Image (cartoon, coloured by chain):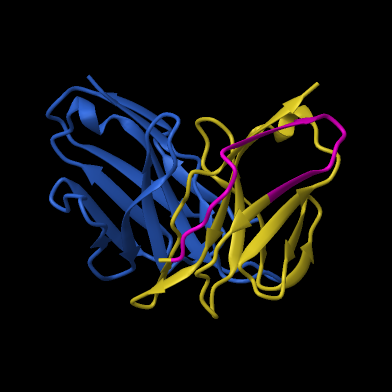
Chain colours: A yellow, B blue
Amino acid sequence: LAKTTQPVSMDSYEGQEVNITCSHNNIATNDYITWYQQFPSQGPRFIIQGYKTKVTNEVASLFIPADRKSSTLSLPRVSLSDTAVYYCLVGDEVGGNEKLTFGTGTRLTIIP
Amino acid sequence: GAVVSQHPSRVICKSGTSVKIECRSLDFQATTMFWYRQFPKQSLMLMATSNEGSKATYEQGVEKDKFLINHASLTLSTLTVTSAHPEDSSFYICSARGWLAGATDTQYFGPGTRLTVL
Protein backbone atom coordinates (compact mmCIF):
# COMPACT_ATOMS: atom_id res chain seq x y z
CA LEU A 1 0.00 0.00 0.00
CA ALA A 2 1.23 3.44 -0.87
CA LYS A 3 2.07 5.37 2.30
CA THR A 4 1.86 9.09 2.81
CA THR A 5 3.74 11.41 5.14
CA GLN A 6 2.47 14.82 6.18
CA PRO A 7 3.36 17.34 8.88
CA VAL A 8 1.43 16.55 12.02
CA SER A 9 0.30 20.12 12.59
CA MET A 10 0.48 23.62 11.12
CA ASP A 11 -0.61 27.05 12.26
CA SER A 12 -1.45 30.00 10.04
CA TYR A 13 -3.05 33.42 10.34
CA GLU A 14 -6.31 34.33 8.74
CA GLY A 15 -6.01 35.65 5.21
CA GLN A 16 -2.77 33.82 4.49
CA GLU A 17 -2.18 31.18 1.84
CA VAL A 18 -1.49 27.78 3.37
CA ASN A 19 0.49 25.06 1.67
CA ILE A 20 0.46 21.53 3.05
CA THR A 21 2.93 19.13 1.49
CA CYS A 22 2.54 15.37 1.42
CA SER A 23 5.17 12.78 0.53
CA HIS A 24 4.21 9.57 -1.27
CA ASN A 25 7.44 8.04 -2.51
CA ASN A 26 5.90 4.69 -3.44
CA ILE A 27 3.03 6.01 -5.52
CA ALA A 28 2.01 3.63 -8.30
CA THR A 29 1.51 4.55 -11.92
CA ASN A 30 -2.28 4.27 -11.73
CA ASP A 31 -2.69 6.03 -8.39
CA TYR A 32 -4.46 9.35 -7.98
CA ILE A 33 -3.79 11.74 -5.12
CA THR A 34 -6.80 12.86 -3.13
CA TRP A 35 -7.11 15.35 -0.29
CA TYR A 36 -9.84 15.38 2.32
CA GLN A 37 -10.80 17.79 5.09
CA GLN A 38 -12.27 16.61 8.36
CA PHE A 39 -13.91 18.60 11.12
CA PRO A 40 -14.43 17.06 14.59
CA SER A 41 -17.21 14.47 14.71
CA GLN A 42 -17.82 14.66 10.97
CA GLY A 43 -16.90 12.47 8.05
CA PRO A 44 -14.06 13.56 5.77
CA ARG A 45 -15.03 15.96 3.00
CA PHE A 46 -13.52 15.65 -0.47
CA ILE A 47 -11.43 18.69 -1.38
CA ILE A 48 -9.50 17.92 -4.52
CA GLN A 49 -8.00 15.13 -6.56
CA GLY A 50 -5.23 15.03 -9.13
CA TYR A 51 -2.86 12.83 -11.08
CA LYS A 52 -0.14 15.18 -12.25
CA THR A 53 0.80 18.86 -12.69
CA LYS A 54 -1.78 21.25 -11.29
CA VAL A 55 -5.45 20.99 -10.47
CA THR A 56 -7.57 23.88 -9.25
CA ASN A 57 -11.15 24.08 -8.06
CA GLU A 58 -13.22 26.61 -6.18
CA VAL A 59 -11.66 25.84 -2.80
CA ALA A 60 -8.06 24.72 -3.38
CA SER A 61 -5.22 23.98 -5.74
CA LEU A 62 -3.17 20.83 -5.92
CA PHE A 63 0.39 20.88 -7.21
CA ILE A 64 2.03 17.63 -8.25
CA PRO A 65 5.63 17.54 -9.54
CA ALA A 66 6.66 15.42 -12.48
CA ASP A 67 7.97 12.54 -10.36
CA ARG A 68 4.65 12.46 -8.41
CA LYS A 69 6.48 11.54 -5.21
CA SER A 70 4.91 14.46 -3.39
CA SER A 71 2.00 16.84 -3.67
CA THR A 72 1.07 20.19 -2.17
CA LEU A 73 -2.39 21.31 -1.23
CA SER A 74 -2.74 25.07 -1.41
CA LEU A 75 -5.55 26.87 0.40
CA PRO A 76 -5.85 30.52 -0.62
CA ARG A 77 -6.69 33.16 1.99
CA VAL A 78 -7.66 30.85 4.82
CA SER A 79 -10.30 31.72 7.40
CA LEU A 80 -11.06 30.41 10.88
CA SER A 81 -13.47 27.90 9.38
CA ASP A 82 -10.57 26.19 7.62
CA THR A 83 -9.32 24.89 10.97
CA ALA A 84 -9.51 21.13 10.48
CA VAL A 85 -7.49 18.00 9.85
CA TYR A 86 -6.36 17.54 6.25
CA TYR A 87 -5.59 14.10 4.89
CA CYS A 88 -3.56 13.26 1.82
CA LEU A 89 -4.35 9.85 0.35
CA VAL A 90 -3.11 7.83 -2.55
CA GLY A 91 -5.39 5.34 -4.22
CA ASP A 92 -4.26 1.73 -4.16
CA GLU A 93 -5.73 -1.02 -6.29
CA VAL A 94 -6.29 -4.16 -4.22
CA GLY A 95 -8.09 -7.04 -5.90
CA GLY A 96 -9.86 -4.60 -8.18
CA ASN A 97 -11.16 -2.50 -5.28
CA GLU A 98 -9.53 0.81 -4.62
CA LYS A 99 -9.09 1.34 -0.92
CA LEU A 100 -7.60 4.40 0.67
CA THR A 101 -5.29 4.28 3.64
CA PHE A 102 -5.44 7.27 5.96
CA GLY A 103 -2.24 8.56 7.47
CA THR A 104 -2.05 10.81 10.49
CA GLY A 105 -3.22 13.88 8.61
CA THR A 106 -2.22 17.50 9.22
CA ARG A 107 -4.02 19.40 11.92
CA LEU A 108 -4.31 22.96 10.60
CA THR A 109 -5.11 25.70 13.08
CA ILE A 110 -6.03 29.14 11.80
CA ILE A 111 -5.21 31.97 14.16
CA PRO A 112 -7.30 35.15 14.18
CA GLY B 1 -21.69 17.11 -4.85
CA ALA B 2 -22.15 13.49 -3.97
CA VAL B 3 -24.10 12.83 -0.82
CA VAL B 4 -23.66 9.87 1.44
CA SER B 5 -25.93 9.57 4.46
CA GLN B 6 -25.65 7.52 7.62
CA HIS B 7 -28.29 6.57 10.11
CA PRO B 8 -28.36 6.92 13.02
CA SER B 9 -25.98 9.80 13.65
CA ARG B 10 -25.68 8.87 17.29
CA VAL B 11 -26.58 5.75 19.24
CA ILE B 12 -26.20 4.72 22.86
CA CYS B 13 -26.74 1.10 23.76
CA LYS B 14 -26.22 -1.35 26.57
CA SER B 15 -23.38 -3.83 26.56
CA GLY B 16 -24.34 -7.06 24.83
CA THR B 17 -26.85 -5.58 22.43
CA SER B 18 -26.48 -5.29 18.65
CA VAL B 19 -26.53 -2.05 16.72
CA LYS B 20 -27.15 -1.56 13.00
CA ILE B 21 -25.79 1.42 11.11
CA GLU B 22 -27.03 2.25 7.61
CA CYS B 23 -25.03 3.92 4.88
CA ARG B 24 -26.73 5.23 1.74
CA SER B 25 -25.45 6.87 -1.40
CA LEU B 26 -28.17 9.36 -2.26
CA ASP B 27 -27.36 10.58 -5.76
CA PHE B 28 -25.16 7.94 -7.29
CA GLN B 29 -24.82 4.19 -7.41
CA ALA B 30 -21.99 2.76 -5.39
CA THR B 31 -20.76 -0.69 -6.26
CA THR B 32 -18.20 -0.43 -3.48
CA MET B 33 -18.63 0.97 0.01
CA PHE B 34 -16.11 1.13 2.81
CA TRP B 35 -16.45 1.14 6.57
CA TYR B 36 -14.04 2.98 8.84
CA ARG B 37 -13.65 3.42 12.56
CA GLN B 38 -12.12 6.44 14.21
CA PHE B 39 -11.11 6.79 17.85
CA PRO B 40 -10.66 10.22 19.45
CA LYS B 41 -7.67 12.18 18.15
CA GLN B 42 -6.77 9.36 15.77
CA SER B 43 -6.98 8.83 12.06
CA LEU B 44 -9.57 6.75 10.26
CA MET B 45 -8.94 3.00 10.23
CA LEU B 46 -10.41 0.95 7.42
CA MET B 47 -12.45 -1.95 8.74
CA ALA B 48 -13.84 -3.55 5.61
CA THR B 49 -14.63 -3.16 1.94
CA SER B 50 -18.18 -3.95 0.90
CA ASN B 51 -19.19 -4.88 -2.63
CA GLU B 52 -22.79 -5.06 -3.77
CA GLY B 53 -24.02 -8.62 -3.90
CA SER B 54 -20.92 -10.25 -2.45
CA LYS B 55 -19.23 -10.83 0.88
CA ALA B 56 -17.30 -8.03 2.48
CA THR B 57 -13.52 -8.07 2.66
CA TYR B 58 -12.28 -7.39 6.16
CA GLU B 59 -8.99 -5.81 7.14
CA GLN B 60 -6.59 -7.75 9.27
CA GLY B 61 -7.59 -7.75 12.91
CA VAL B 62 -11.27 -6.92 12.29
CA GLU B 63 -13.62 -9.67 13.44
CA LYS B 64 -16.06 -10.45 10.65
CA ASP B 65 -18.47 -12.21 13.01
CA LYS B 66 -18.64 -9.18 15.23
CA PHE B 67 -18.95 -6.54 12.53
CA LEU B 68 -21.50 -7.85 10.06
CA ILE B 69 -21.65 -6.03 6.76
CA ASN B 70 -24.41 -6.34 4.20
CA HIS B 71 -24.43 -4.56 0.85
CA ALA B 72 -27.78 -5.56 -0.57
CA SER B 73 -28.16 -2.82 -3.18
CA LEU B 74 -26.14 -0.27 -5.09
CA THR B 75 -27.18 2.45 -2.68
CA LEU B 76 -27.25 0.77 0.72
CA SER B 77 -24.72 -0.92 2.97
CA THR B 78 -25.26 -1.79 6.62
CA LEU B 79 -22.83 -2.44 9.45
CA THR B 80 -24.11 -4.39 12.44
CA VAL B 81 -22.03 -4.37 15.59
CA THR B 82 -23.04 -7.57 17.33
CA SER B 83 -22.86 -8.02 21.10
CA ALA B 84 -21.39 -4.58 21.50
CA HIS B 85 -19.03 -3.85 24.39
CA PRO B 86 -17.67 -0.57 25.72
CA GLU B 87 -14.45 -0.99 23.74
CA ASP B 88 -16.54 -0.86 20.55
CA SER B 89 -17.49 2.71 21.37
CA SER B 90 -16.17 4.77 18.50
CA PHE B 91 -17.03 6.95 15.53
CA TYR B 92 -18.03 4.79 12.56
CA ILE B 93 -17.82 6.30 9.10
CA CYS B 94 -18.82 4.83 5.77
CA SER B 95 -17.77 5.91 2.33
CA ALA B 96 -19.08 5.15 -1.13
CA ARG B 97 -17.01 4.99 -4.26
CA GLY B 98 -18.50 6.69 -7.26
CA TRP B 99 -18.20 9.14 -10.10
CA LEU B 100 -19.42 12.67 -10.35
CA ALA B 101 -19.69 14.48 -13.64
CA GLY B 102 -16.35 16.04 -14.50
CA ALA B 103 -14.51 14.23 -11.69
CA THR B 104 -12.63 10.99 -11.44
CA ASP B 105 -13.64 8.00 -9.42
CA THR B 106 -13.20 8.78 -5.75
CA GLN B 107 -14.69 8.09 -2.34
CA TYR B 108 -17.35 10.21 -0.69
CA PHE B 109 -17.82 9.92 3.04
CA GLY B 110 -20.88 9.85 5.22
CA PRO B 111 -21.27 12.12 8.26
CA GLY B 112 -20.42 9.33 10.70
CA THR B 113 -22.20 7.53 13.52
CA ARG B 114 -21.14 7.99 17.12
CA LEU B 115 -21.60 4.71 18.99
CA THR B 116 -21.47 4.68 22.77
CA VAL B 117 -21.75 1.35 24.54
CA LEU B 118 -22.53 1.53 28.24
Q: Splitting the image into 4 quarters, where does residue A81 fall?
A: top right
Q: Which residues are magenta?
A: A2-20
Residue at image x 43%, y 57%?
A: A101
**In the picture provided, is A91 more to the left or to the right than A66?**
left
Residues A84 and A66: in front is A66
**A5 part of magenta stretch:** yes
Q: In which quadrant is the N terminus of chain B drawn?
A: bottom right
**In the picture provided, is B55 more to the left or to the right than B47?**
left
Task: Tell me where residue B42 appears, x and y as whole percent.
Answer: 43, 36
Task: Tell me where residue A52 appears, x and y as whole percent.
Answer: 70, 73
Residues A28 and B6: in front is A28
Residue at image x 67%, y 52%?
A: A21
**B20 part of magenta stretch:** no
Residue at image x 33%, y 42%?
A: B21
**In the picture provided, is B1 more to the left or to the right than B64?**
right
Task: Tell me where residue B48 appears, x and y as whole percent.
Answer: 30, 56
Task: Tell me where residue B89 appears, x and y as whole percent.
Answer: 29, 29
Residue at image x 13%, y 50%?
A: B65
**In the picture provided, is B71 more to the left or to the right than B26?**
left
Note whether B79 is above or below A10 in the view shown.
below
Residues A26 and B96: in front is A26
Q: How many marks?
A: 0
Q: In which quadrant is the C terminus of chain B drawn?
A: top left
Note whether A88 is above or below B114 in the view shown.
below
